[in-house]
């Protein structure tokens, strides 16, 4: 099976829509790959949907590498993108290059994503020059939750919309192979998509981007603590999971489980000897 590369993703712009989903472990990586998604993001949303934090600020490089390696053991086809966690790249260009490299040397990721535009152009160029493809991420950047005062849509005013367009153009010039646009008005996403020659991947950014990304647990209805309006649930696995485990609990109580077929028995000969 040929692995999808960052240049493959770049070449898809204008050819067909691109799909991306997050994954955090071996089974979710396997499932995303089996569904033939183009890119798997090992997202720092890990902190919220898997580790139970209120935001993404507590996620560490070690968390990301541990989970990224597990995803890589499950997914052999999709391009795996490692999401650089809070403070793994912001402090310096050297730190950004070193941590980006760890995603490739310690997991099967073959690209990284980092949040932010203008303040990180030098970081991005240095990472790309070191051999690591970079996906940009602008709009609602969750690592700025403290500065934004919550998870708030961005680019709603004419001025901030124009700034986002300039930032996307600068990210392309810095060397990004694609850009995630999160929670920006669809008109802004459309303008950016037309202005740059690298694919835009939208989440809550409307139908005009080159691709879409959603969080695994949101698609499957596994996470209901906080579900943004732009999420579409394609299944209700949380409810189904609770029902399944409840059935198990009830059958253990009643003795219906385990039944014939759920365990092994000794051959008559062996049993006779065993009993004597
Ligand atoms: O961590 C994440 O899941 C993300 C996507 C929502 C783009 O950054
Ligand atoms: Na993220």
Image: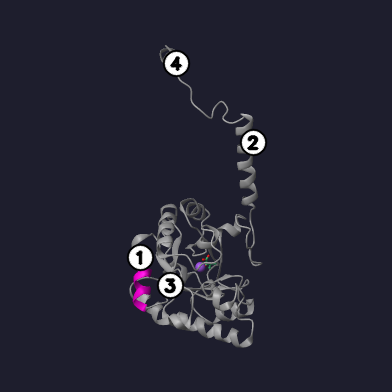
Label 2 residue SS: helix
Given residues 105 and 193, the one toward you in this image is: 105
Q: Which of the two discs, 1 and 3, labels the residue nearer the N terminus?
A: 3
Instruction: List x then y, in percent, for residue 42.
Output: 47, 62
Q: CA distance from mark 2 to mark 4?
A: 31 Å
Q: Is residue 1 in view?
A: no
In magenta, the rendered stretch is: 93-101
Relative to 184, is 230 above or below? above
Q: Which of the two discs, 2 and 4, labels the residue nearer the N terminus?
A: 2
The residue labelled by disc 4 is 271
Q: CA distance from mark 1 to mark 2?
A: 46 Å
The residue labelled by disc 2 is 250
Relative to 121, is 207 above or below? above
Q: Is residue 163 in view?
A: yes
Confirm or deny contact between disc 2 and disc 3 (CB under 8 A): no
The residue labelled by disc 1 is 102
Confirm or deny contact between disc 4 and disc 1 (CB under 8 A): no
Figure quadrant of residue 65: bottom left
Q: Residue at (58%, 86%) from the top-left corner?
A: 162
Q: CA distance from mark 1 to mark 3?
A: 15 Å
The CB of the residue at mark 4 lies under 8 Å from ligand 1? no
Q: Horizontal placement of 123 versus 148: left or right?
A: left
């Amino acid at each position: 099976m040929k692995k999808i590369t960052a240049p493959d993703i770049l070449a898809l712009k204008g050819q067909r829509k691109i799909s991306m989903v997050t994954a955090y472990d071996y089974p979710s990586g396997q499932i995303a790959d089996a569904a033939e998604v183009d890119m798997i993001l090992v997202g720092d949303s890990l902190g919220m949907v898997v580790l139970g934090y209120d935001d993404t600020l507590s996620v560490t490089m070690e968390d990301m590498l541990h989970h990224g390696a597990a995803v890589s053991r499950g997914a052999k086809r999709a391009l795996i993108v490692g999401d650089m966690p809070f403070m793994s790249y912001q402090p310096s260009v050297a730190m950004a290059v070193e941590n980006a490299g760890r995603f490739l040397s310690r997991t099967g990721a073959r690209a990284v994503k980092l949040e932010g535009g203008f303040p990180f152009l030098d970081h991005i160029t240095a990472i790309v020059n070191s051999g690591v493809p970079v996906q940009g991420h602008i709009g609602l950047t969750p690592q700025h939750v403290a500065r934004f005062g919550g998870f708030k849509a961005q680019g709603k005013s004419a001025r901030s919309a124009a700034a986002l367009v300039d930032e996307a153009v600068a990210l392309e010039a810095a060397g990004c192979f694609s850009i995630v646009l999160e929670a920006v008005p669809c008109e802004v996403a459309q303008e950016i998509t037309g202005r740059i020659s690298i694919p835009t991947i939208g989440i809550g950014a409307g139908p005009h981007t080159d691709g879409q990304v959603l969080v695994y647990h949101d698609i499957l209805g596994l996470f209901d603590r906080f579900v943004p309006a732009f999420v579409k649930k394609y299944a209700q696995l949380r409810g189904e999971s609770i029902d399944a485990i409840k059935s198990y609990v009830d059958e253990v109580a009643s003795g219906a489980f385990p039944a014939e077929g759920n365990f092994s028995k000794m051959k008559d000969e062996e049993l006779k000897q065993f009993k004597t």
